[in-house]
Amino acid sequence: MRARIDASDIPRSRISRSTCVAIVAETDFTGRVVFEGLRPSTAYRGLVRFTDAGGRSVGILPGDSRLDANPYLTVAVATGMGEARNAIVVRTADVVIAVRGEFGTLSEIALALKIGKPVVGIGTWEFGKEGERVDAIVRATDPRDAVAQALRLAGR
């Protein structure tokens, strides 16, 4: 499974940091997880455990330098594309897992839904259209549930 786990707001949120670390720790180590924009301090413990157990992680970075990436990524792709790289991240994923997030996360959720990719969310965006709630995101209660939902949606 290739999952995109949003960590865009992790440095500002202790809850999101621990949630993302737990998601990494829960992920099947034989699969692939695609992270975007991970800096050295982000999800450090979870990513170390993940790579130590044989998992592969790919960072699709917004900037020009791979040096800005978390050193525990297996592959760091410096796109120099800023937020435009969100399309690459979403197209690469089988399932998108959104943890909280801001407008960058919102754009990735929208892209995923537009092209038919499932989205699992923990405390993330809610949608409405013409005054009615739209339940486009599969809601998870915790990291274990998020991974279980993502694996189910990916058919694994």
Image (cartoon, rainbow, N blue to C red):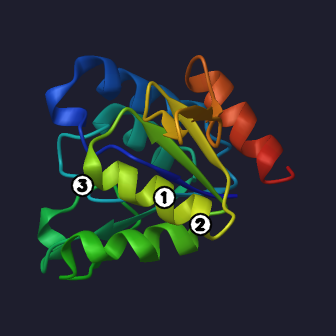
Q: Are marks 1 and 2 in contact (CB under 8 Å)?
A: yes
Question: How far is disc 2 from disc 3 in space, using C-alphas?
Answer: 30 Å
The residue located at (18%, 82%) in the rendering is 80
Residue 35 appears anywhere in the view: no
Residue that extends furthest to the front in the rendered view of this protein: 130
**Amino acid bearing label 3:** Asn
Left or right of 103 on screen, residue 54: right
- In the depicted view, which residue is nearer to us: 15 or 86? 86
- Residue 70's disc is 3
Question: Which residue is tagged 2?
Answer: 114
Left or right of 4 on screen, residue 67: left
Left or right of 106 on screen, residue 153: right
**Amino acid bearing label 2:** Lys
Looking at the picture, how far across and down is residue 74, in whole percent? 41, 65
In the rendered image, which quarter is residue 150 located in? top right
Q: Secondary structure at mark 3?
A: loop
Question: Which residue is tagged 1?
Answer: 110
Question: How far is disc 1 from disc 2 in space, using C-alphas?
Answer: 6 Å
**Amino acid bearing label 1:** Ala
Rendered position, 96 above or below 99? below
Question: How far is disc 3 from disc 1 in space, using C-alphas?
Answer: 26 Å
The residue located at (13%, 64%) in the rendering is 68
